[in-house]
Amino acid sequence: NSTSREHFKHFKRDGIHIVYTVRLSLKEAIDNSGIQVPTLEDRSLTVQLDRQQIIELYANTEVFIRKVGLGLPIPNNVLIRGDLIIRCQLRS
């Protein structure tokens, strides 16, 4: 259905892993009210950057946060899942 397609367009597949990209300003990262990240189960996950991740974001304009087990299931074993990788990019 169209709602499912709309939901999944925010994700990029990388094998069994799912990548979600979010762009945020340095101020948003420092304020640290949390990033709302959708999951495949149509829920929302609140992710906060720690001090080291904020420094890495500032230095490299990008930081990756891995949430283990929130990606796609392995084809022959639905009990094992890939990861949800949150790609935070610095917006100027």
Image (cartoon, grey):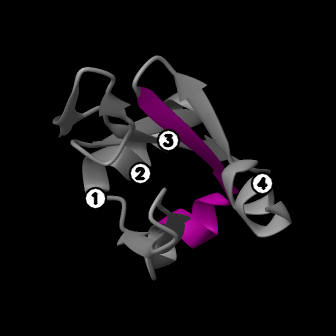
Residue 61, can we see it? yes
- Residue lying farthest bottom? 33
The residue to which callout 4 is attached is 5
- Residue 1 appears left or right of 4: right
Quadrant of the image occupied by residue 61: top right
Relative image position of residue 21 (x, y in whole percent) = 63, 44
The span picked out in magenta is 17-29
For marks 3 and 4, give the one nearer the viewer: 4
Proximity of marks 1 and 3: CB atoms separated by less than 8 Å = no
Which mark, by number, is residue 57?
3
Which secondary structure, mark 2? helix
Give yes or no for residue 52 being in the magenta stretch. Answer: no
For marks 4 and 1, give the one nearer the viewer: 4
Establish if 21 lies above or below 2.
above
Placement of the N terminus among the 4 image quadrants: bottom right
State how far apart marks 1 and 2 are (Cα): 6 Å
Q: Which secondary structure is most common in the magenta stretch? A: strand
Q: Identity of the amino acid at label 4?
A: Arg
The residue to which callout 1 is attached is 50
State how far apart marks 3 and 4 are (Cα): 30 Å
Q: Identity of the amino acid at label 2?
A: Ile
Give yes or no for residue 23 being in the magenta stretch. Answer: yes
Viewer-closest of 77 and 55: 77
For marks 2 and 4, give the one nearer the viewer: 4
Crowd around label 2: few <14 · some 14–19 · many ≥20 (10 Å): many
- Residue lying farthest left? 79
Proximity of marks 1 and 2: CB atoms separated by less than 8 Å = yes
Which secondary structure, mark 1? loop
The residue to which callout 2 is attached is 54
Which residue is depicted at the point 36% across and 67% down? 48
